[in-house]
Image (cartoon, helix red, strand yellow):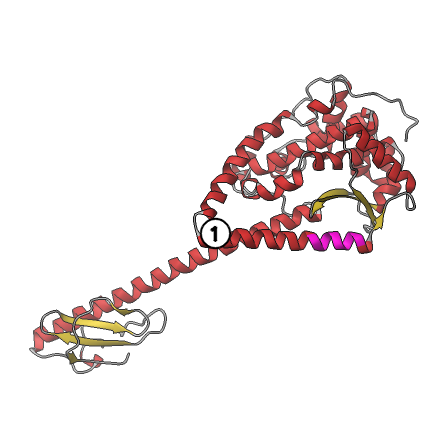
């Protein structure tokens, strides 16, 4: 792959690797996240959920790292030394003093890589099929490793946890995540030292290990502007990765440092996109998917008690209305008969004051008491007595 012409990226250095949009979106996402975390912090229940979120995230990520250490191949001087040398060279180019632990895992044909962090240690994982497709010492591999180190240098793993509530918001959360990938493609291109190699690395992800290196980059980038429409726009707005065709466009724009062209999006896609949560559910990285699974569990744990409270209030109100109806019937019976009812049958029936005996929503049993001072009150075995008169003259019991 290194036999192609080498084109160095123009105007790219360590100081300007992170895309400007990433900084802009960061302030929006951190503001939203702070609002949610503050809401959690003001209540003991909220703090409990936050602690639960942290624990399960730590546990899940620990299991992921354990899988890497026990099932993957740790790259070093004695194991895949060419790949280890490429990693050291990339770290030196990007100003990383301590290279992360690098593992290769068998992926069943998937072409992917990801970065993660656990207990203060950084990890980069390359899927075996991608290693075979790119080669351990190629510029394309330098691009790939540089991309993943970009995530670590930009502290995206930490931000993914702390800013998870904000990233769950529609449109803004996904846009922030897409800006990460744009930034990391810039890291990778600087590490590769070749715009064409960076583009070829992305083309392998698009076309596969056999045909990807031979794809025509110009034809592929034309898809970004030619193949548009509502669903393409919706896919772009809800995805946490820029489309591969757009990523190739952005990388190739680094040949001369010009701003990459942007294809228009369908306006109605924004309306539907605003209803779809962001955050990266279902993305390829196990670490990313884990964060969103835990976040969904956290939000569900917060919502369930609120739902239960609303339901309990509704049930209590329905029972209260039943009690008021029975009190009105007992009062009317006493007024018309100059005596109190002795059983519910005196007031309940097809031709009575109440056509059918009302049922408590939670299967409570109704009984009635009468006070000369305050009149009738109905007691429910589940919801109690709303009027609380003094007990004096017992009247109907049972349902």
Q: Is residue 63 magenta?
A: yes
Q: Work out whether residue 135 can be spotted.
A: no
Q: Nearer the viewer, residue 193 or 337?
A: 193
- Given the current orientation, which residue lies at the most extreme bottom position? 342
Which of the 4 image quarters holds residue 60? bottom right
Q: Report which quarter residue 85 is drawn in.
A: top right
Q: Secondary structure at mark 1?
A: helix
Residues in magenta, as a range? 62-69
User: x%, y% of residue 168?
Assistant: 56, 43
Residue 16 can be seen, yes or no: yes
The image shows a total of numbered marks equal to 1
The N terminus, quarter of image: top right
Viewed as shown, does residue 93 lie left or right of 271?
Answer: right
The residue indicated by pointer 1 is 46
Name the quadrant of the C terminus.
bottom left
Residue 299's spot in the image, x, y percent?
A: 52, 51
For the point 63% across and 37% down, which residue is it?
A: 177
Q: Nearer the viewer, residue 69 or 160?
A: 69
Crowd around label 1: few <14 · some 14–19 · many ≥20 (10 Å): some
In this rendering, the answer to whether 283 lies above or below 355 is above
Q: Is residue 379 magenta?
A: no
């Amino acid at each position: 792959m290194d036999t192609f012409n080498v084109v160095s990226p123009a105007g790219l250095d360590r100081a300007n690797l992170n895309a400007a949009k990433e900084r802009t979106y960061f302030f929006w996402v951190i503001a939203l996240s702070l609002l949610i975390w503050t809401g959690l912090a003001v209540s003991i229940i909220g703090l409990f959920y936050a602690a639960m979120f942290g624990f399960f995230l730590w546990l899940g990520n620990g299991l992921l790292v354990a899988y890497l250490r026990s099932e993957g191949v740790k790259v070093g001087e004695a194991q895949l030394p060419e790949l280890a040398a490429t990693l050291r060279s990339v770290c030196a180019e990007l100003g990383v003093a301590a290279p992360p632990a690098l593992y290769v895992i068998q992926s069943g044909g998937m072409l992917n890589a990801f970065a993660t962090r656990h207990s203060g240690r950084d990890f980069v994982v390359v899927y075996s099929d991608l290693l075979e497709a790119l080669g351990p010492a190629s510029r394309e591999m330098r691009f790939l490793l540089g991309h993943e180190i970009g995530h670590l240098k930009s502290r995206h793993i930490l931000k993914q946890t702390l800013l998870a509530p904000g990233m769950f918001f529609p449109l803004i959360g996904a846009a922030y995540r897409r800006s990460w990938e744009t930034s990391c493609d810039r890291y990778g291109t600087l590490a590769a030292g070749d715009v064409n190699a960076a583009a070829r690395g992305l083309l392998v992800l698009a076309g596969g290990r056999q045909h990807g290196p031979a794809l025509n980059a110009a034809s592929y980038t034309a898809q970004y502007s030619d193949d548009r429409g509502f669903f393409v726009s919706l896919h772009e707005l809800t995805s946490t990765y820029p489309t591969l065709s757009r990523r190739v466009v952005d990388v190739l724009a680094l040949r001369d440092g010009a701003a990459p062209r942007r294809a228009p999006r369908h306006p109605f896609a924004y309306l539907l996109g605003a209803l779809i949560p962001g955050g990266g559910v279902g993305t390829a990285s196990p670490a990313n998917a884990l964060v969103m699974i835990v976040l969904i569990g956290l939000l569900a744990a917060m919502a369930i008690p609120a739902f239960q409270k609303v339901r309990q209030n509704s049930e209590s109100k329905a029972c209260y209305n039943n009690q008021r109806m029975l009190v009105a019937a007992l009062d009317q019976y006493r007024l018309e008969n100059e005596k109190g009812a002795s059983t519910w049958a005196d007031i309940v029936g097809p031709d009575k004051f109440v056509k059918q005996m009302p049922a408590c929503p939670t299967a409570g049993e109704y009984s009635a008491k009468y006070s000369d001072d305050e009149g009738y009150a109905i007691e429910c075995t589940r919801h109690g007595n709303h009027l609380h008169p003094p007990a004096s003259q017992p009247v109907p019991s049972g349902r």
